[in-house]
Image (cartoon, grey):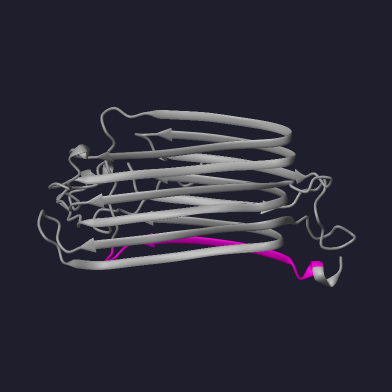
Amino acid sequence: MNAKNLSMIVAVAVALTIAVAGVVSASPPVKAPNETSIITTVVDIECYGSVTESESLTETHSTQNLSDNNLTFDERVGQIKYQEKLNAQDGFVQFTKEFKFDGSKAPNLAVEKRLGFLNDPTSLISWVDSTENVGMSIVTEGDNDTIGGMEGLCPWAQGACIPAGNEMIAAGSQLRRVEIVSAQTKTAVTTTDSPRLHHEISAKGTDVWGIWADEAKTEGPYGKGTIKAGMKVSVQEGHGCVNGTYPLAGELTYNEMTSASGLWKFSKSMTYVAQIPAVQLPRQYPVFNLPA
């Protein structure tokens, strides 16, 4: 491989975890409504040609009256948003997706995608675009309640102060005009239990028509095109935990974006976890996590 091509090679690996605690202690879970929905879809595609696929979800629920457009005493509102779009043109496409939304059990949203694409060298418009966005919002009026579950049985947690808060989290990843790629993404969001948002992407080239860093094929293969992944966090919290006008106690903003263009291997994991120190007890169970 010549020097020009070597200068385009990028290897990226990023792992990011944000746990919000302390003054800006973030928001508690939002209890699920009495009646919730479960949505499950499974997609499996193998095609030489063109493939398009899109999906969107918006779910909002409240512990009080959602339709009044007002935040009332002791009210908590949670929202999950998700959107995904795939557009592959004139190439060999392998695509699988498992999507599940459960309004009452954590994780409330779980999505896993796998994408393989090889461009057609005889076509001038052979490429794949893929975009995935996920968001979580929790707004609380502030109350003297516990987060529920076993933690609520703890005598030191009863009547714990949960301040008013406004929490907005977003993450996502994108492939743009990519000619060769083997990629996997995982997404999970929970609002009804300990609030958490996670999105990760891992992408590289393929062994069939992949691009290698050397003639001996000891480094590579590499994906080709443009790939991006990023996260945005905005958290605000007031003083006090009863209905009223709250002075702003703390504010957190975080913006992060990683991109690579040319030839690349790319891996990035992004996680946001909300904690309420007054009621978030140390968890010792389980010792081992079950395999996914």
Q: Which residues are magenta?
A: 5-24
Image location (x, y in percent) of residue 32: 29, 36
The quadrant in which the C terminus is found is: top right
Residue 3, quarter of the rendered image = bottom right
Image location (x, y in percent) of residue 102: 40, 33
Residue closest to the eye, 28 or 66: 66
In the rendered image, the vertical position of residue 229 relative to residue 67, given as above or below? below
Magenta span includes 229: no
Residue at 67 percent across and 32 percent down: it is 45
Residue closest to the eye, 254 or 88: 88
Image location (x, y in percent) of residue 76: 23, 46
Image location (x, y in percent) of residue 107: 42, 40
Residue 279: in sight, yes or no?
yes
Magenta-colored segment: predominant secondary structure:
strand
In the rendered structure, the answer to whether residue 47 lies left or right of residue 209 reads left
In the rendered structure, the answer to whether residue 30 lies left or right of residue 218 reads left
Residue 275: in sight, yes or no?
no
